[in-house]
Every structure is written in C-alpha cells, then in structure tokens.
Amino acid sequence: MTSPEVRLVRARVGLAAGLLLIALLTPVAVASVASGTADAYRATHGLGTEGTFVPERQSCHQRRPWSPWHCSWYGTFTADDGSVVLDEVLLDHSLRTRRGDEPPPPVTPALFGGSTDPAVVHLPGDRWWLPLAVALGLAGAAAVTTLRLLRWYRRASRPAESRHQA
C-alpha cells in the first residue's frame, strides 16, 4: 500500500504527462490534417488554379464486405492557361458514378490547390464544411481528454478513505 503523499505525486506526474502529451500531439495532428485541408480549402474557395479534369481511370474500394463501393477517378488536369498539366491526379469527388462505369466527360471547372503530394483537384464549393469539422473535432478531443485527466487527477489525489465512501 502506498502513502497518500506518494499517490498525490503519482497523480500530479500523470496529469502533467497527459497534458504534455496533448500539448505535443495537438500541433502534429493539426499540421497533418491542415496540409490536406488547406489545399482543399484554397481550391474550393477560388484560390486554386482553374482548369479541366479529364477522368481516365476509376479506382474503387469497400471498407467492409457488406458496405457499398466507393469509387474515385484519376486523370489529367490541365490549367485553363496551360501553366499546369498534371497526370494521375485524383479528383476529390465521385462524380456520382458507380463501379465499372465508363469515364464521364471532362469536368470544368476543376480547381487545383497547389499541393502535389498527392496531387488532388477539387470542384468549386465542394467541402466547404471541412475546416469547421476539423476544428470542432480537435477541440472536442482535447476537451474530453483534458476533462478525463482532471477527473483522474482528482480521484488519485483524494485520500484513500474518501474514495471508498462515495
């Protein structure tokens, strides 16, 4: 059995470690999500390069054997002014096609946000909700983790007798 002082020190160290972990991992998570989000945001809000996407190859997958197929299109993007030509570009939209469909006609306007890792083109106004969803998700995860750490800290720092009474 440990003394109340040892439990209190362990609780404080645990709380400090948890909060430090949140402080270190949050910027990493934000940066990794923001790189793709920023590209999508730039493109879908008219800040990208406008051009034409020509669908050439369909790629489909299922998350589970019983779930519906999700299909994406890869093709060539050419800027309207000819300044950018990209092959094997992913279109961030299904074009409402199904598995095995023939390639649809060229998509105009398509917007390229500037990132080539991976190269993705977007449709105007698509994914307007993405920055809000990312921000709310990260804020919610940080709040829940902080509240659980504080609850654990309060429990661990109480004397053993009062923990068993409630």
Image (cartoon, helix red, strand yellow):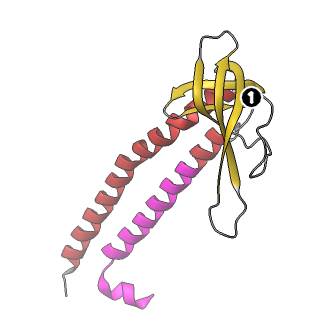
Left or right of residue 151, residue 63 in this image: right
Label 1 secondary element: loop
Which residue is more in the foreground, 14 or 76? 76
State which quarter of the image contains the N terminus: bottom left
- Describe residue 25's horizontal placement relative to residue 92 as left or right: left
Q: Which residue is mark 1?
A: 124
Q: Nearer the viewer, residue 17 or 79?
A: 79
Image: 144 above or below 88 = below
Q: Quadrant of residue 146?
A: bottom left
Magenta-drawn stretch contains 162 = yes
In this view, 138 is above or below 39: below
How many labels, in total? 1
Rendered residue at 33%/75% (across/down): 156
Place of residue 51 in the rendered image (x, y in percent of width and height, measured from the top left) = 70, 19
Location of residue 63 in the rendering, given as x and y in whole percent from the top left corner: 62, 62
Given residues 150 and 26, the one toward you in this image is 26
Residue located at (29% from left, 58% from top):
17
Q: Residue drawn 38% across and 49% down?
A: 25
Q: Position of residue 41 (x, y in %)?
A: 63, 31
- What is the three-letter code of the residue carrying label 1? Pro
Q: Is residue 131 above or below residue 107?
A: below
Residue 63 in view of the camera: yes
- Packing grade of label 1 (10 A; few <14, some 14-19, many >=20) is many
Compared to 120, does 138 lie above or below?
Answer: below
Quarter the C terminus occupies: bottom left
Residue that appears at 32% across and 88% down: 161
Magenta stretch, residue numbers: 137-166
